[in-house]
Structures are given as C-alpha cells and as structure tokens.
C-alpha cells in the first residue's frame, strides 16, 4: 500500500511539474481581452475614454427633482422614485437623498488626479502636446466642479493633491477650513482660464468644460431658486458672499450694506438659514444673486415655497432690486397672475414658444 501511494504521489508531482513547465509561456502572455492600467496610456482612444469617464461622474443640477419631495405641495406621477416615496410618507432612516453625491464627487476627483498624473505617458506621435494640455485643463476644471459642489452640499472638504492609495490611513485626511476650500476651487478654475476656449467650435466638444463661459455665468448671471439653496452650515453673510468668494472677489461692503438693508435682512447676517422663515431665506437668496452685480437675474419659481404674502413681498423685492440696480429679471412661473406683472410674457408649451407678448 505504501509503494502504491508513493507511486501515485510521484506521478502527481510529475504531472504538476509538467503542467507548471507547459504553462509558463501562457502566464507570460498579455490577455488580449483584458486591459491593464498601462495599456490605457498607450493609445489616444483609451486615454480619451478615461477622460470621458470622469465626465460621467457629473450629476444633474444639485437642484434635482429629489429635493422636491421636501415640499408638501409636491405631486409626482412616477412610481418607485425618491420623490414619490417622500410624498407618500414612505421615507425612513435607511433612505438616502438621491445619489451618493459625496462618493461620486470624490471618485471623480480621484479619477481626474490619475488622469493628470498619467496623460503625459501617451506617446507624442499618438496624442499631441496641445491636446494633452487641453485635456489636463479639462480634468482640473472637473475637479474644481466636484469640489465646488461638495462645498455647496456638505461644507468644507478634503483636498487631494495626488491619487489616494488603498492602504493609506484615511484618518490622516481632514477637512480644510472654509476659506482654504474656496481658494482651492478658485485656483483650479483659474488655472484653466487661458487654456480652454471661450466656446467650443466643434460639436464633438458639446458638453465639455468651458471655463470662460463658466466665469461669464458667474459674473453676468444671478440665480434665485425655488428651494433657496442656502447652506445651513454657514451664516447668512457667508451665504450671500459665497458666489463672489468662489470667483476670487471680495464683496463691495457699501453695496452689501445697501442690498441687505433694502431686503430687510441687515440684522440677520450672523444668523443661520435654519433660524429664518421661508420668506427671510428667499430674501437671503435674492441678496446672494444681486451682490455680484450680474446683468441678468434668473428666478425659477421664486414664490413656489412661500405663502401668498411672502410670495408677493418676494416679487416686489425682486422687481425693485432689478430696477434699482439696472438688472434684467427673468422669472419662470406657472402662475399667470405673476406673469402679468412682467413687461414681456413668453409662453412655452412642450419646449416650444407659443406666444410672445409685450
């Protein structure tokens, strides 16, 4: 029995040796259907696909429909959606508000850092230096966008200067002070200013980062939202001044005092949004839209979350401010009574203009 077992064992070991020898060449071969990290930076197609993947982490506006579920007046016809669940009262501790934007933003940031660290590895004959410079600027712009939204949604963030390693102790990463976060976002955006074009001329670039247009929107347009979009972690003053700070500018103290006095919130500057009524929060939002001295103010259903009295006050303030500071006011509304107060009424149905009245 011992001899038989020894023979079986010897044959087994011999077979293993044969398999090991015969499989060496196979193990050294690069799988044709499996892309490695190094292969990404060998071709233009793969490198550009990696950049496009970073764009994929962009979500819809932070004013996405899921927020509507917080309003008692919400009506949603789509079943099995977050909004519908909120409206029906089927919302509990295990539910999350829409997608995990925290995770999406940091994943996008990490992807962008990897891209910026490796794009120069693509051979010059495959991808030109000019395109590499453009793509790195797009990646920095995207990092700025992700960080800006993290600041809006969650407050101060963790700054990564290089891709994080899996074995790192993430307890060593801490949120930076608010002012430092603002400066960091501004720095990222400004670094792309002279690289990205004013407007993409090719349809192949539709949807791509356009820094100068972003700056134009920040400096020439103000926005007033139905949900106010104030950050509860920051004082009224910080909320009002945030667009300017993100643009690297300091508020005009005299103009700030004039605007807040006109809106009746000059005594509320040290308070926080959650300490204010709905009407007061909307006044803060109006002040925020005006302080940068934009040419146009867009107001999206600005009275939607207010009672009738507060709604009328808000409209009067918007109109008065626009007239006082020489701004054009564009209001989106479903309320015909509000529309009648405008100098021009444009009616849109199914995405088409059906009437344009002065």
Image (cartoon, grey):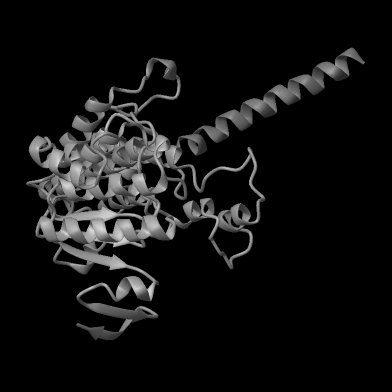
| Residue located farthest toward the bottom when viewing the structure as drawn | 354
**How many dots with numbers?**
0
Of residues 281 and 90, the one drawn nearer to the viewer in this rendering = 281
Position in image of residue 348 (x %, y %)? 34, 79
Q: Quadrant of residue 174?
A: top left
User: Can you see residue 241?
Assistant: yes
| Residue located farthest toward the top when viewing the structure as drawn | 2
Relative to residue 58, is residue 24 drawn left or right? right
Residue beneath the point at 20% across and 75% down? 343
Residue beneath the point at 40% across and 80% down? 350
Q: Is 219 placed above or below 274 here?
A: below
Q: Quadrant of residue 149?
A: top left
Position in image of residue 113 (x %, y %)? 29, 35
User: Can you see residue 229?
Assistant: no
Q: Quadrant of the N terminus?
A: top right
Of residues 256 and 354, the one drawn nearer to the viewer in this rendering = 256
Q: Is 150 placed above or below 164 here?
A: below
| Residue located farthest toward the right when viewing the structure as drawn | 1
Q: Is 248 placed above or below 314 here?
A: above
Of residues 224 and 141, the one drawn nearer to the viewer in this rendering = 224
Position in image of residue 273 (x %, y %)? 37, 37
Q: Quadrant of the C terminus?
A: bottom left
Position in image of residue 118 (x %, y %)? 26, 36
Relative to residue 296, is residue 8 drawn left or right? right
Of residues 241 and 27, the one drawn nearer to the viewer in this rendering = 241
């Amino acid at each position: 029995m011992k001899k038989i077992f020894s023979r079986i064992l010897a044959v087994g070991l011999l077979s293993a040796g044969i398999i090991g020898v015969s499989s060496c060449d196979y193990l050294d071969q690069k799988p044709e259907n499996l892309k490695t990290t190094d292969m990404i930076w060998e071709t233009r197609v793969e490198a550009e696909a990696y950049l496009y993947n970073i764009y994929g982490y962009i979500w819809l506006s932070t004013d996405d429909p899921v927020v509507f579920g917080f309003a008692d007046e919400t009506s949603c016809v789509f079943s099995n959606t977050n909004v519908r669940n909120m409206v029906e009262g089927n919302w509990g501790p295990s539910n999350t508000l829409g997608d995990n934007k925290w995770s999406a933003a940091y994943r996008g940031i990490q992807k962008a850092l990897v891209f910026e660290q490796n794009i120069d590895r693509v051979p010059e004959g495959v991808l030109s230096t000019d395109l590499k410079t453009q793509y790195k600027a797009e990646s920095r712009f995207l990092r700025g966008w992700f960080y800006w939204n993290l600041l809006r949604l969650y407050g101060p963030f963790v700054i990564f200067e290089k891709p994080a390693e899996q074995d790192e102790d993430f307890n060593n990463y801490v949120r930076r002070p608010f002012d430092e976060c603002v400066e960091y976002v501004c720095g990222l955006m400004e670094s792309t200013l002279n690289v990205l074009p004013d407007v993409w001329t090719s349809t192949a670039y539709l949807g791509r980062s356009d820094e100068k247009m972003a700056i134009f929107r920040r400096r020439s347009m103000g926005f007033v939202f139905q949900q106010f979009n104030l950050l509860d972690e920051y004082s009224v003053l910080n909320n009002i001044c945030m667009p300017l700070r993100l643009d690297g500018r300091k508020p005009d103290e005299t103009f700030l005092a004039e605007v807040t006095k006109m809106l009746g919130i000059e005594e509320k500057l040290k308070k926080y949004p959650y300490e204010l009524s709905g009407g007061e929060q909307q006044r803060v939002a109006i002040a925020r839209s005006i302080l940068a001295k934009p040419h146009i103010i867009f107001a999206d259903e600005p009275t939607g979350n207010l009672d009738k009295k507060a709604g009328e006050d808000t409209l009067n303030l918007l109109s008065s401010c626009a007239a006082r500071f020489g701004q054009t006011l564009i209001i989106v509304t479903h309320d015909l009574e509000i529309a009648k107060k405008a100098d021009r009424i444009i009616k849109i149905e199914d995405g088409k203009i059906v009437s344009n009245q002065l």
